[in-house]
Image (cartoon, grey):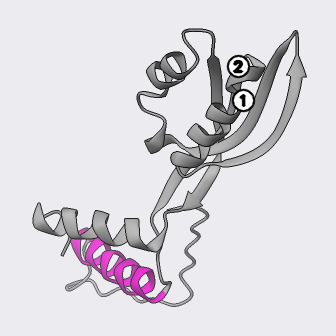
Amino acid sequence: MVDVKVCVFDGSYHEVDSNEFAFIEAARQAFKQGFLKANPQILEPVMNVEVSVPEDYMGAATGSICQRRGRVDGMDEKGGAKLVRGFVPLGEMFGYSNSIRTMTQGRGSFTMSFERYEAVPFELSEKIIEKRKAEGKVR
């Protein structure tokens, strides 16, 4: 959840029926109703990735970004090496250091930093929800 703000406009207190648990439960129910009406989406962290490779391996580097649900943002040259910049979901970056070294015969490297959150594609979010339901963590 990001950018959530709640305002209470009206309420009442009764000395017999009002207690902390009643207010907590009312807040929980109100949040649940509002959450479901808001059409929620699963978000994932997207990383800003910069891959440095010799020119001979530039096609392999751009292909590796695209294979990981990434988008290539630009290409530059720096110190005789080619730099491929793009955005890739963090969940797709695990094991990338081995992959880039393998495809460039040990001459490629990359850096990444957090960029933003983006909505998970519908097909993938459905799989995540079904898996969580099977584990009993979603109702």
Q: In the image, is residue 127 part of the stretch drawn in magenta?
A: no
Q: How would you rate the neighbour count of disc 1 (Cα within 10 Å): few for under 14, some for 14-19, many for 20 or more?
A: many
Q: Nearer the viewer, residue 132 or 20?
A: 132
User: Type of residue at label 1?
Assistant: Met
Left or right of 64? Residue 123 is left
Q: Point out the image quarter for the C terminus.
A: bottom left
State which region is magenta. Answer: 20-37
Left or right of 45? Residue 94 is left
Task: Name the mark on residue 41.
Answer: none
Residue shown at 29% from the left, 67% from the top:
127
Left or right of 37? Residue 21 is left
The kind of secondary structure element at disc 1 is helix
Q: Nearer the viewer, residue 26 or 90?
A: 90
- Residue at numbered disc 2: 53
Residue 20 higher or lower than 18, as above or below: above
Q: Residue 27 appears at what percent x and percent y?
A: 36, 76
The quarter holding residue 113 reads top right
Q: Nearer the viewer, residue 15 or 23?
A: 23
The quarter holding residue 104 reads top right
User: Type of residue at label 2?
Assistant: Val
CB atoms at circles 1 and 2 under 8 Å apart?
A: yes
Residue 106 higher or lower than 49, as above or below: above
